[in-house]
Image: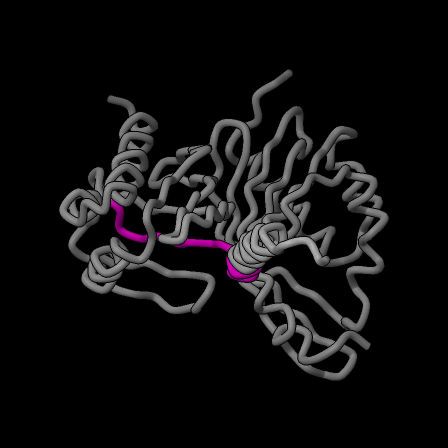
Amino acid sequence: MSAMTEYEVRELCNEFFDAYQDGRVDVLRRIMSDDCIVWHNVYGRDTTRDQNLEAYPDSYTGQRRRTYNDRIINAFDDGFVIQYSLNGVMHTGHKGALWICIVGRVRDGKITRIDEYMDSSKFAAWMGGPRA
Amino acid sequence: MTVDTTHRRLCHALFDALEQGDVDGVDACYAPDMTMWINVSGETITREANLEAVDKGRGLHRRRLYNDRNINSFDDGFVVQYTTHVVTHDGTEVPLSACLVAEVRDARITKLFEYLDTTQFRSRARSKKARSKKTESERTESRQPEPT
């Protein structure tokens, strides 16, 4: 196990969000460890990397584009915290933004855990109505 | 004392003071120009507004604990993932997972960013109340005399 530098941690964080933005599931699979766990405060439960990546296409339903902007990243010994805006453009043309915070754990150049915090009461306004 | 230790102590001092409703203790953790941003409203409030909210919030619940504090520090701040455990005046217990990012300067907090899910808090509070009402109605029902 080798420690990662702050630069490497920041680069890994940005690579993760770029891949999520561009729909690069292959990159996500490469930079998330096999045993990576994703936890959402909205559901309060853990999901595996594979469950998360399988759900990726469905999570895009009704959306034309998603961008992960205003990234404020702080790195610590074995992870990072990122605060960002998730900007979405729906097929209806509606534009919405969500403010999200993720705490990530890293090991050997990969992300091993993701804890995501957001306010689900903002979902409806973000989508601009029921999903198409 | 290392920066890491300073920031961790500051985080615990803030949460301990919040638990105890100690407004002066909370104030001691803040820089004079401290601001707080909350994802629920998307608004930034001043230190004075935050302290006023802490003061007013003291009587809202019977007890509020900040448990499971998972703290990581970086050069000019810290992030803490935690569970707010609220006990309301009617005894309802509501846990809520939240995350706080803090910017620190000279051992005082200059900015706070709070992320939580309000839907979760409301639905848990509602479902626990509903369960408690159901239990009460079941108790009432069980006290009804058997039909003859």
Quarter that holds the C terminus of chain B? bottom right
Q: Please indicate, yes or no, whether residue B138 appears anywhere in the rendered image.
A: yes
Rendered location of residue B136, percent (x, y)? 54, 54
Q: Is residue A115 left or right of residue B63?
A: right
Seen from the viewer's position, the closer of residues A80 and B88 is B88
Image quadrant in which you'd find residue B9 = top left
Seen from the viewer's position, the closer of residues A51 and B147 is B147
Rendered location of residue B110, percent (x, y)? 26, 51
Q: Is residue A121 left or right of residue B14?
A: right
Image quadrant in which you'd find residue A26 = top right
Rendered location of residue A71, percent (x, y)? 53, 55
Seen from the viewer's position, the closer of residues A105 and B124 is B124
State the count of labels.
0
Quarter that holds the N terminus of chain B? top left
Residue in view at x 72 percent, y 33 percent: A36
**Residue B110 colored magenta?**
yes
Q: Residue furthest front?
A: B148
Q: Considering only vertical position in the picture, is A81 above or below B115?
A: above
Residue in view at x 77 percent, y 71 percent: A63
Residue in view at x 54 percent, y 60 percent: B126
- Magenta residues, start to end: B109-124
Rendered location of residue B141, percent (x, y)? 62, 55
Residue in view at x 70 percent, y 66 percent: A66
Q: Please indicate, yes or no, whether residue A100 appears anywhere in the rendered image.
A: no
**Residue B44 colored magenta?**
no
Q: Is residue B142 left or right of residue B74?
A: right
State the colouring used for the structure image. Answer: one colour
